[in-house]
Amino acid sequence: MPPAEPVAAVPSPTDAALIAAWQGGDEQAAAELVRRHARALARFLAGAGAPEEDLDDLVQETFIRAFRAVGSFRGQCRFRTWLLTIGGNVLKDAHRRAKRSRVVPLGDDVRSTDGDPHERAVAAEAEKRLGDGLRRLPRLQREVFLLRAQQGLEYDEIAAALGTTPGAARVHYHHAVKRLKEYVK
């Protein structure tokens, strides 16, 4: 029996190819873009202060806006960078709407009962301090920090997404890290 021929891996299409396919009517291309980027977008939004219960709606709204405006995407940055920028704007809009409406918080009646209670308490306290610290950062420092630390973007991509320079992005990141270390102590 002759040895089996190796099967060459088919490279995944680039985001640009998927965008072009979607614009040509391929709904599966849009689904692939969502599959590729939704998790990173949700992490970014959560880190930027989005309430967990609103994450799915904010991610969906971001993709709706992105697909409506995809014709304006010029490829000057990665698609994910552009998408995260739109997500940041969606979150800002949601915060503005929330300020105008009165919300009555409900109690936390249901808690997780697994794991060591001391470890859960320590982790919850650290997470709370980090979240509080992120909320206390100026908007630009918070966004630069999340794009760099959470999403792994380079400073030139961050600069393109936020309309600043790579040098300014570095400075904002440095200041954000310094302040967060102070807040988390």
Image: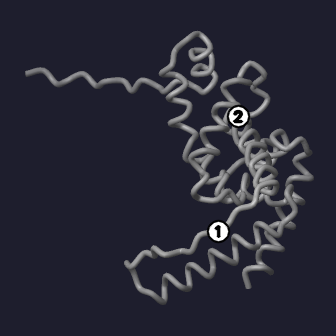
Residue count near mark 2 (Cα–Cα under 10 Å), binned few <14, some 14–19, many ≥20: some
Residue 156 lies in quadrant: top right
Residue nearer the viewer, 114 or 81: 114
Give the x, y percent position of residue 81.
72, 39
Looking at the image, is mark 2 or mark 1 earlier in the sequence? 2
Asked whether 65 or 159 is in front, the reply is 65
**Would you place residue 178 above or below residue 22 in this image?**
below
Labelled disc at residue 105: 1
Q: Quadrant of residue 85?
A: top right
| Residue at far top of view | 24
Q: Secondary structure at mark 2?
A: loop
Real-space Cα separation, disc 2 to disc 1, in angstroms: 38 Å
Q: Residue at x 89, y 41 (%)?
A: 163
Q: Amino acid at mark 2?
A: Arg
* Mark sitting on residue 78: 2
Label 1 Cα neighbours within 10 Å, binned few <14 / some 14-19 / many ≥20:
few
Against 52, residue 79 (above or below) is: above
Q: Secondary structure at mark 1?
A: loop
Residue 18, numbered label: none
Please name the amino acid that badge 1 sits on: Pro
Q: Where residue 143 appears, x then y in whole percent?
A: 79, 54
Q: Quadrant of the C terminus?
A: bottom right
Residue placed most toward the observer, 107 or 125:
107
- Please say if 107 is above or below 78: below
Q: Position of residue 97 (x, y in %)?
A: 78, 49
Pair 2/1: label in front: 1
Residue at 85 percent across and 57 percent down: it is 139
Report the residue at 78% width, 73% height from top.
Answer: 180
